[in-house]
């Protein structure tokens, strides 16, 4: 069974062009978040600092990505979306761990 990635999860009443555009935008958004978070995690680790990041922002992103995991597995979505839903909370959680590490280091 093959699923068309551009049209497989669209409503039948939507124009195909709109559906393809929405799916492409969603895929680009996921790729951008991955491209943004991995270098940020690396940079934080190298400089042993989370300076410039907001713990509120990191907590909100982690909470949203965790909620997305439950959504992604409760409806029929393509496998790659489920993979994205799993690795995003991992990346977000690693940023929260960096906050914990930095705060514990500062308190010594």
Image: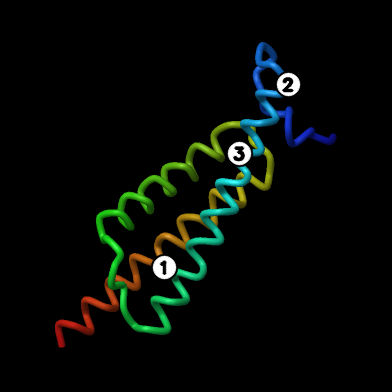
Q: Position of residue 20 (x, y in %)?
A: 70, 30
Of badges 1 and 3, nearer the viewer stands: 3
Front position in the image: 32 or 97: 32
Which residue was labeled with disc 3? 25
Element at badge 3? helix
Of badges 1 and 2, nearer the viewer stands: 2
Spatial CA distance of label 3 from label 2 is 14 Å
**Residue at position x 69%, y 14% from top?**
12
User: In the picture shown, does residue 45 fall above or below 77?
Assistant: below
Which residue was labeled with disc 1? 94
Element at badge 1? helix
Mark 3 touching mark 2, by CB under 8 A? no
**Residue 94 position by quadrant:** bottom left
**Residue at position x 37%, y 51% from top?**
61
**Left or right of residue 68, residue 18 in this image:** right
Front position in the image: 104 or 24: 24
């Amino acid at each position: 069974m093959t699923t068309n990635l551009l049209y497989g999860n669209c409503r039948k009443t939507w124009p195909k062009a709109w559906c393809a555009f929405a799916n492409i935008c969603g895929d680009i958004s996921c790729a951008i978040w991955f491209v943004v978070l991995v270098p940020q995690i690396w940079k934080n680790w190298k400089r042993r600092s989370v300076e410039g990041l907001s713990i509120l922002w990191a907590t909100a992103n982690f909470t949203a990505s965790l909620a997305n995991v439950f959504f992604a597995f409760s409806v029929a979505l393509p496998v790659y979306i489920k993979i994205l839903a799993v690795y995003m909370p991992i990346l977000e959680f690693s940023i929260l761990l960096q906050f914990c590490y930095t705060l514990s280091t500062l308190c010594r």
